[in-house]
Image (cartoon, rainbow, N blue to C red):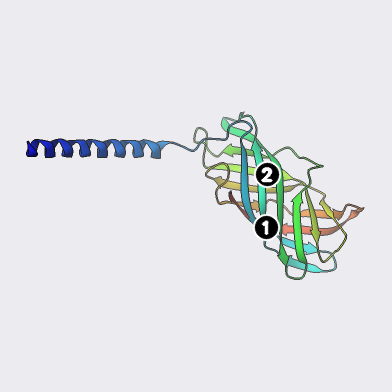
């Protein structure tokens, strides 16, 4: 009786181990899903832009903040799955040596289209490329009482997205962004020359 009980227990444990291995193997084969329509993502972001200010110089910044984005309805982009992305909110701030407290945030009065998430290879979902385009506002202690707005779009790109919402995804600034005083437009006062950002789920 004792031997039969031991045998039964051993067989049960062996069966459970085989089932667990099969489940884990199948789980490993599952690919991360693209976002569903209207799915939102709230993320933490760290940005290290190089900021040029007229008559003051060039400064390396370290800004931290939050980003909120929402996915649209999936579409076909030359055989690859893609979804439009809408930047709903973004705000970053930090103390910059030579400029003081500096803040950059989303200009909601000038929404932009053209942000998207697209798989790099058809049928794989991820890795994927994400592009985010937006207009920004900027203030800095070095220029008190002034608010600056981006003239062209602020565009960042990540070509190695593994999940959505982003998880420690690295974005780079596609091209420099010029800013003008909202109360005295026409003169470029601030430029974001380059920059990298890390965006992750909050």
Crowding near the residue tagged with mark 2, few <14, some 14–19, many ≥20 C-alpha atoms within 10 Å: many
In the image, residue 101 lies at what x, y percent? 76, 64
Q: Is residue 43 above or below residue 36?
A: below
Is residue 29 shown left or right of residue 32?
left
> In the depicted view, which residue is nearer to us: 9 or 122?
9
What numbered label is drawn on residue 195? 1
At a point 16% along the width and 39% down the height, the residue shown is 10
Is residue 116 shown left or right of residue 151?
left
Q: Is residue 92 above or below residue 6?
A: below
Q: Mark 2 = which residue? A: 132
- Mark 1 → mark 2, Cα distance in angstroms: 14 Å
At a point 73% along the width and 70% down the height, the residue shown is 97
Q: Quadrant of residue 116?
A: top right
> In the depicted view, which residue is nearer to us: 96 or 29?
96
Q: Label 1, secondary structure: give it.
A: loop
In the image, residue 158 lies at what x, y percent? 60, 48
Q: Label 2, secondary structure: give it.
A: strand
Q: Is residue 64 above or below residue 26?
A: below
Q: Quadrant of residue 3?
A: top left
Crowding near the residue tagged with mark 1, few <14, some 14–19, many ≥20 C-alpha atoms within 10 Å: many
Looking at the rendered image, the quarter that the N terminus falls into is top left
Is residue 149 shown left or right of residue 81?
right
In the image, residue 77 lies at what x, y percent? 61, 31
At a point 12% along the width and 40% down the height, the residue shown is 6
At a point 67% along the width and 62% down the height, the residue shown is 62
In the image, residue 99 lies at what x, y percent? 78, 67
Q: Is residue 31 above or below residue 193?
A: above
């Amino acid at each position: 009786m004792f031997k039969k009980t031991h045998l039964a227990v051993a067989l049960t444990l062996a069966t459970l181990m085989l089932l667990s291995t099969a489940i884990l193997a199948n789980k490993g084969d599952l690919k991360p899903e693209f976002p569903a329509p209207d799915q939102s993502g709230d993320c933490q972001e760290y940005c290290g832009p190089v900021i040029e200010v007229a008559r003051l110089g060039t400064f390396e910044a370290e800004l931290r903040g939050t980003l909120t984005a929402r996915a649209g309805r999936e579409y076909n982009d030359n055989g690859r799955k893609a979804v439009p992305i809408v930047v709903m909110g973004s705000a970053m701030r930090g103390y910059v040596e030579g400029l003081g407290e500096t803040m950059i945030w989303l200009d909601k009065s000038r929404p932009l289209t053209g942000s998207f998430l697209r798989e790099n290879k058809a049928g794989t979902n991820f890795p994927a490329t994400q592009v985010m385009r937006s207009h920004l506002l900027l203030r800095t202690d070095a220029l008190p009482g002034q608010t600056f707005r981006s003239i062209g779009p602020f565009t960042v790109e990540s070509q190695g997205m593994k999940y959505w919402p982003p998880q420690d995804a690295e974005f780079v600034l596609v091209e420099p962004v010029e800013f003008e005083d909202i109360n005295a437009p026409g003169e470029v006062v601030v430029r974001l020359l380059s920059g990298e950002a890390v965006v992750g789920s909050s």
